[in-house]
Image (cartoon, rainbow, N blue to C red):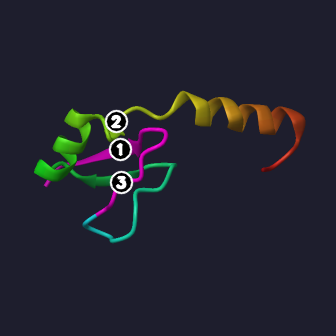
Amino acid sequence: MTRITVYPVEGRVVPDPELGGVLPPEGREVPRDAYWLRRLRVGDVSDRKPAAAKASAKAAAATGSAE
């Protein structure tokens, strides 16, 4: 089965039926099935890495701080 990488949209807690628990903020590779395609369609997850996460990681690296 084809797999895709998805990221939770800010403010959303998305259950992961395959591994249990919730989808982590850094995203996860998941099966491209009806469940995840529905989550994409309704806007619970995105297939693009969140820009805010990239920006905060760059800022932490630039200042030498780790939050």
Q: Which mark is residue 47?
A: 2
Q: Quadrant of residue 5?
A: top left
Per the model, the C-alpha gap separating discs 1 and 3 is: 11 Å
Q: Which residue, given by chain and number where applicable, does mark 1 sit on? A: 6
Give percent across and percent down for residue 1.
Answer: 13, 55
User: Depth check: 2 or 44 in front?
Assistant: 44
Point 25% across, 38% down: residue: 40
- Residue furthest to the bottom in view is 20
Q: Amino acid at mark 3?
A: Val
Give, as a single range, the part of the protein colored magenta.
1-16
> As drawn, is 34 to the left or to the right of 18?
left
Per the model, the C-alpha gap separating discs 1 and 2 is: 5 Å
Q: Secondary structure at mark 3?
A: loop
User: Depth check: 11 or 2 in front?
Assistant: 11
Q: Which residue, given by chain and number where applicable, does mark 3 sit on? A: 14
> As drawn, is 60 to the left or to the right of 24?
right
Name above or below for residue 8 compared with residue 49: below
